[in-house]
Amino acid sequence: MHFAQLLPLFAGLAAAAALPRAESTVCANPVKRVEFRTLDATLRKQYTDAVMCLTTKPSSIGLKTSLYDDFTYVHTHLSRDIHYVAQFLPWHRYFTHLYHKQLQACGYTGPMVYWDWTLDTKDVAGSDFWDPVNGVGGNGGDETEKTNDGREWKCLVDGPFKDIRPAYSNLVAAEHCLSRDFFDGENRPGTMRASGYTPEVIADMNKLPDFESFEFRLENIPHGSIHSAVGGQMGDLGPSSSPNDPIFFMHHCQVDRLWTLWQQQNLEVRLKDYAGIRERLETPGSGNGTADGNSTQDEIPNPRAALTDMMPFMGLTGAEDLAVSAVMDTNSELLCYTY
Ligand SMILES: [Cu+2]
């Protein structure tokens, strides 16, 4: 074969390498995810009905509790592996995707939905997102329930989810009412920490140049502000049973949307940009000790993340553990959605 004959091949390879996506792995018709409030009344009802349907289905991981509770159970048990580490974004991306699939199995025919909280920052507590009929229901009321892990929950008073009885509180089996407790750290509801997720804050975050700084900002500021502002189960910090509140998934869909939009600014680089801490090691003397018993007071650096890192899902809805690289691109055969 002459060198000249190889040239077109080389040229072809170079062009393929320059494309951010390999043709063969791109999905044909990515589904466009939308803001919850833009669903028409029929789809909105389908969505909330499908959430309720999850509470009537058996566990996918052999528990005595429902499929609904599986999501909380898995999230709580993996809490330390999936928060304040690089995996935070890809793990919750796939978790939300698995949830959407189960909603579909329960009759929901629309796309996964997000709650774009940047639309509500002028008056978060007064937002129509909380509408009892067209929204997700509002704040918890005066009625409370105590669980045997020492918590007291302000029960929801309205909305499509008010009768849900989550089975777990952190790692404890403790059935209780669904709860919210709007709080900004000083006042109830106060501003609901809106300064952490205004359009300006998000625009500023979008300028961050690399995954590690972007992930850190997104997880700690907007994501964390919403969790603590909504309170109740959403405010439940590690080991977190926050998926108890169905709005968890609309919140994480929005977090995933922001990551995707950030990736879209430079697909070629950002579909592969993944870095940060792989796992948070136990500090010596904090309980677990070191595996070899060779306890030392020296700082052990947290191991660094890589695209080949495997994400655990504990068999949730039959899912296998997955490499981070498998979910970097939402426009893939596996995920097949866009925003
Ligand atoms: Cu989480």
Image (cartoon, rainbow, N blue to C red):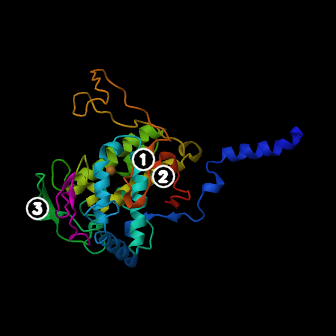
Which residue is found at the position 27% from the left and 23% from the top? 295
Q: Does the magenta stretch include residue 165?
A: yes
Which percent across, then down, holds residue 300?
34, 25
Is 125 above or below relative to 106? above
Distance of mark 2 from mark 3, alpha carbons? 39 Å
Asked if the residue at tag 2 contacts the one at tag 1, i.e. Cβ–Cβ closer than 8 Å, the answer is no
| The N terminus, quarter of image | top right
Which percent across, then down, holds residue 251?
34, 57
Q: Name the residue under label 1.
A: 311
Earlier sequence position, callout 2 versus callout 3:
3
Q: Mark 3 points at which residue?
A: 145
Which type of secondary structure does the marked residue at label 2 adopt? helix
Earlier sequence position, callout 1 versus callout 2:
2
Distance of mark 1 from mark 2, alpha carbons? 19 Å
Which type of secondary structure does the marked residue at label 3 adopt? strand
Q: Is mark 1 within 8 Å of ligand 1?
A: no
Q: Which of marks 2 and 3 is in front?
A: 3
Which percent across, then down, holds residue 236?
22, 51
Distance of mark 1 from mark 3, alpha carbons? 35 Å
Q: Name the residue under label 2.
A: 260
Q: Give the range drawn in magenta.
A: 160-182
Is 66 above or below relative to 197? below
Q: Does the residue labelled 2 lie within 8 Å of ligand 1?
A: no
Which residue is found at the position 37% from the left and 77% from the top? 41
Q: In which quarter of the image is residue 152?
A: bottom left
- Label 2 is placed on what type of residue? Thr
Nearer the observer, 216 or 265: 216
Q: Which of marks 1 and 3 is in front?
A: 1
Dot label at residue 191: none
Earlier sequence position, callout 1 versus callout 3:
3
Q: Nearer the viewer, mark 1 or mark 2?
A: 1
